[in-house]
Each structure stands twice: as C-alpha cells, then as structure tokens.
Image (cartoon, rainbow, N blue to C red):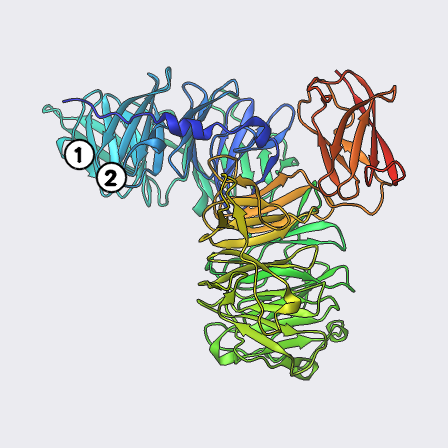
Amino acid sequence: MMKQFISLCLACLALLQVNAASTSKWRIHPSYVGTDIQNIVDAGDKVYYLVSNYLYRLDKDTKENESLNKVNLLNDATITGIYYNDYKKYLMIAYADANIDVILADGSIVNLPDIESASLTGSKTINDITFTADGSAYVATAFGYVVYNDSKWEVRESHIYNTNINSAAVVGNHVLLSAGSTIYYGTVGTHYETLSQMSTGGSNDSGRIYPISDTRFILCTGWTTLVTITQNSDGTLNFSNATLAEYRTSNLHKTPSGYLGNCLAARTYYTLDASGTLQSTVDGGAAMYSAYSEGDGTLWSVTARGVHSAADSAAYYKPNAISTTTPYWLRYDTRNNVLYVTSTGTTGLINDQTLPTSVNTYDGNTWTDVTPTPTIAEGGTYYPVFLPSETSSYLMGSWWSGIYKVTDGKIAYNYNWENSPLQHVSNYYCHATIDLDAGGNLWAVQSGPEAGTGIFVLPSSKLSQATTTSSDWVRVNIANLEGSKRARWLLTRRSNVKLYADGNFGGNLIFFDGSSISSTVSSRSYSTLTDQDGTTYSWNNICSMAEDNNGTVWVGTTNGVVSLNPANALSTGFSVNHIKVPRNDGTSLADYLLDGLQVNAIAVDGANRKWLGTDASGLFLVNSDGTKILQSFNTGNSPLLSNKIYDICCDPNSNSVYVTTAGGLMEYYSDSAPSQSDFSNIHAYPNPVRPEYLGDITIVGLMDNSLVKIADAGGNVVRQLKSTGGMASWDGRDANGNRVKSGVYFIMASDSDSSSSTGGVGKILIMR
C-alpha cells in the first residue's frame, strides 16, 4: 500500500519569514520560574535548559547566558519540549503548535514545519522525540508518529492512526509505540496501515520509551521500569520488567558511563550503567541534572538560582528574566522610573483567582523580583497603583482580601472587612477594583451582590495612617453601580469627570462628577451610547479605557473602540465619536475602527497615537484621532507571541512599548518617544555608529514635531527629518538614498521652519 506522507505547506514557510528590520524592533522578555523547570541538556560546549516554556543557552567558556526565542534565533514560540540527539549532537525543539526547530552542532538552525502545516482536523501535539543511530528522528504525536531523515531533513515516514501516541522509539529491529495502556510493536521499515496490524505486549500507562540497547528500554509511566525484550520462536516478543524507581522519570540523559534519570517531582536523580543496571539514587533537591555523553562526567544542573556546574559549587548563572509564567498587568511608576509587571487575579481573560502573586520591576536593563512579603496566601492580586506622597509604597486590589498596601517590598497594611466598608461576602470575598485620583485619594468598588452598590473612597490624608476604620472612608452613592471581575476605573487627569465601567455582560458605563468627595454626586449611567451619526453603539463588555494627551477618553469594548469628551457626558444629548477609517479607494466610504473586534487594552504614546490590543487579532497602532491605522502586528507578520493581547504600556521616558500577550511579555521599539519642553538633552543612539550597524539611528530629546537637519562637518545639510513626538529616526543616508561617509555629523533641531525658532545641536560619529 502507498505510504501516507505529510505534505509540506510552502505558504506556512512564507509566514515564518519575518522581515529582519521589523524583527530587530522587537524584544521578548522571557519568564524564568524556579518551580517550572522542564529540561536541561549538556551539549558539550553549551548547556541548553528549558524553564517556563522558554529556552536558554549557556556558553561554558564565555559564560554568556542567553534566551533563545522568536526574535533572535527560533522560528516559533511556546516551547513544549527539547530533545538531544547524542548520535548527531543536535537539539530538536517542539512547539505547542507542532512546529519543530533543530539547532545543529555548529549553532545553525533548521525549521521543520511539516507537522504544523499538515491538513489534519484533530490535534497535532508533539508528545515525544527519540533518535536512532542510522539518522532517524521518531516524533510521537496526538495523531500517530512521523519519522524524519536527519541527513536531508525530510519526512521519511508518516503514520496517521488518529490515536494519541505518547512515545515512538526503535529498540533493536522493532519500532515500539506507547499508546494509552498498550505497547504496540512491529518491524522497522514495515508500514502498518492501522495500529491493529501491529502486535501488542507489555504493560503501559501512557509511558515514555527511552531505548538504551537493542534489547532494553526504560519505560516511564507513574513508575520507572527497565524493560528487557526477548523474542519467541514465532517472532512475538516478551517484555520483562524490573522496577528502577517508584516514580516517573522526567527525562533520561546519556552520560560517559551510562545514563542519568531525573525524577524532579520526587527530588531525586539516579544513574545507570551502560546495560541499564541501577548504580545510585541521589537526593537532587529541586534541581534537574545532565552530563555530556562524551565529557568527563561533570554534572550540570538547573535550579531556581540558575544553571550550575558541579565543578564550581559557587557559580550560578541565572538569566535576566521575569519571575512569573503569566505576566499580565503593566503599570509604569513615574516616581522611580521603573515598569511594574504583575500576575493577575480573575479578569475574564484569565480566570484563576488563586494564581500566586508575582510582582517584577524593570528599569530598562534589569528585571528584579519584588514580590511582596510575607507571601499573600492565595494570590488573586491585580495591578499596582502608586501613592504620590510615598515613593516606596503602592496599593493592589485582590480577589480574596480587599486591598493591600505594600511598602519597601513588604505588606504594610490590608484594607478589608475589619477596617473598611468592604464586605466579606461569599464567592467574591472582598474583591475590590481600585484606582487613585489626581489628588491621591483611593477609589474602590467591591464585587459581589451582597456587597451592595456604591463607591468607597479613602481620602489621601487617611492613606498615610497606620490604621483605619470604616468611618475613615466616604461612601459615594451612585445608582446602577456594581462591581465585577472585568470592572475598570478611569479617573481622568484633565477634567473632574470620573469613569467607571462595571464590566458586566451588557453592563454600564458610568460618568460622575468627582471634583469633591461626598456621598452624593452628579452622575449618568449608559448601557448604550449614541454616536455622531445618531446611531446606537452597544457592547457585550467594556474592556479598556484610556485618556489621551488632549483629555479625550478612548473606550475599548467587544465591539471595537470609540472616543468621547468626558466633560460632555453629564449633559443631555451626549454623543461619542464612533471612529471611522477612510478606505482611500476613490470613494467616500469608511469603516469603523476595529469594528467587531474586542479591544482589551489601550495605551497612548508620546505622539498621542493609540496602541490598541485586541483579543484575537493582535496589536494595532493608529494616529492621534484613530482615522488611520499606521501599523498592525500579528503572529503572521511579526514576532508577536500571541494575537491575544492582555495589556499595553508606553514608557513615558523612551520609545519602548511593552505588551503582555497570552504568549508572554514583549517590548517594541517604536518610532516615537515623549516630546520634551526644550532641546537641552538631544542625543542619538547608537553613537558611534560602527561599520557593522545597518539599522536606524534614533534621535531623542526633541520637542514635538521638531524640524531636524543632519549636517556634515562642512555645514552641508545631507538630510532633513520631522520628529514624531520627541523622536526622529535616520537611516544614515543622504537625501539621495546614499549611505553617508565616515565623519562627525551635527543634529540641528528646531521647533519650526522659522529661522527665529528655538533650537539645539547634537553630534553623531559615523564609522564606515
């Protein structure tokens, strides 16, 4: 019968070819959580280790410790497993979408997208990969197994059984398949159309097969077993089991003298000789171990402290990474110029109110774990809000216990049912959505029907007190106001109007006068809005809100985005701007901005442009009024880790845009930075521009919409630019598109085309 082959989809290959210039504008910030260690491979001169689904590599000689990802080397994201071929010295990387990368011994990479691009209706998850000395890689999947020829990197065989194969391996001249409670076997090179055509034998429980000789393999189920194969006269096989460990082996590595098996859950590792005989069982603690099969037997391990060699007991190499697997909320602390990244409570996008609390800061170079102590028992905390009068303090709402005040990294106080109006109610306990207004007053709304309706406000003067009581709070009574896990505050800075979206399905958007704190305020509640054309604008949920640099409020919903003037919201006849993007096709037709898409996040950059994060369509950049889509990013045209965006934050001091996605945290270097009030700090980077650098030269410290002239040492203007916000980009070429020669170039900036305008000067050294 004809063999079934998985066809190569060239279109998918094209999607993986991301423009190099575009890729260079992105950075992936990986996660490294000590309890999420997955594998470590000693590959001789380098050590590869997989933690929190991110791959890291340590160079043993230089001690360079790097994250390998979709931006700098790999072809995909979300790594589920790494597998080392001791025969050919290469590493195979399996991804969640069934794509495969191979890092060869020389460091080059080969992409194998065949399984990912196969036209199959069911799951294509890769469960395991094993290797043979003749140059074959056996890939076990959710539908069957695939055999690669690793000399040509092509599919040699594919076996589609529509059955989950946990492991596929060659032992002697037999191919063995682990599927559920059964081990199937057949002769290597024989094609079996169905699993039922193969023979069965031996006990199994979704095990993984590690061949160690022509007659023996290690089977990892709930226990770890050494299995010896003997053949009967009729060609059938006998499987004889000997228990090695009463727990599952996480992975097995070849060593110079035999094998090393990690049992991370049991905090042990064991060693075998070349025949599979147990030599030792060692207390390994919370570490995973590996040794190079052709080395001197030195063990390398990966722990919460980093990767480590037994030959140097003092040295640990930990990557610069986030200490949570689920970075979600992004908030910038302008008091200390650091970005805060936290995990999440239940938000509607991630429903896990017991997710451990994790707080990290980033100063533009280094990640620091600042998770508060003592540990918040059940987690469920949200984003920080920063106290203007206490530079070392912030507040966080939580699902379980109200509001926490954190000072110098320690829990300083907990506002809950004992010292505030917040109620201890069933299901929602003391779940509070919070924010601070311009005066430093704390505004909170509690979820749960038993909590009633209304807003609780703690005046700024009370926030500095060591203790509080319910009487310190002011209850603001507003009809139709209630809390939920999707609730959002927007306490505007350019008006006295405050906005609250209850986040409920078909819920309300509430505006009220917050110029003073009192029990009764003027308010209006809207379950739908009227747009500029008199058309009703409605939503299922309100997901995000942001105030731009002009005081206009942007509201993202499950039905796109609208903008509005909050000062008009308390008046009769209030309408919103349902933003239209002209088609520019010779007609007067236009489309509503992101019509029908769920907008989870909105951020405003230094040029008053809007960054819009959607639930399934990636990231969009639009101009200041939203009438033009300037850029769009998704997993097909950029290194974006996921099309589901959680949160966005524009760095107020640079051109960095931080984005949390379902795949992790990313940073994009945009073409805009915050504008300055003068030209006293004009500078460019990189500076000097070295011969090998081919990217753009970034000029910052500019005023908004500055005129920038680049002149050579003789005063000849070679290029003229306009800044976006406080930043301009120069490609190092003159007005005719030619690369400029080596030398010193002057940046001459002014705030208009007039010769009488104010200006500033900077320098760039270019080396060719």
- Comparing 764 with 677, the one in front is 677
**Tags 1 and 2 in contact by the CB under 8 Å rule?**
yes
* Residue beneath disc 1: 195
Q: Quick one: SS at disc 1?
A: helix
Amino acid residing under circle 1: Leu
> On the rendered structure, is 282 left or right of 692?
left
Precedes in sequence: disc 1 or disc 2: 2
Quadrant into which the C terminus falls: top right
- Picture residue at 71% right of the left edge, 71% below the top: 441
* Residue beneath disc 2: 179
Residue 749 at what x, y percent from top left?
82, 35
Q: Residue furthest right?
A: 756
- Picture residue at 43% right of the left edge, 27% below the top: 14
In which quarter of the view is residue 21 placed?
top right
> On the rendered structure, is 386 left or right of 164?
right
Q: Residue furthest left?
A: 234
Residue 653 at what x, y percent from top left?
74, 46
- Comparing 192 with 310, the one in front is 192
Residue 718 at what x, y percent from top left?
78, 22
**Mark 2 surroundings within 10 Å by alpha-carbon count, few (fewer than 14), some (14 through 19), many (20 or more):** many
- Picture residue at 17% right of the left edge, 22% below the top: 2
- Picture residue at 47% right of the left edge, 51% below the top: 615
Amino acid residing under circle 2: Ala
Quadrant into which the N terminus falls: top left
Q: Residue furthest front?
A: 587
Determine the CA span between mark 1 and mark 2.
10 Å
Labels 1, 2: front one: 1
Residue 276 at what x, y percent from top left?
35, 29
Regarding residue 310, the answer to whether it shows in the image is no
Q: Is residue 635 above or below residue 460?
A: above
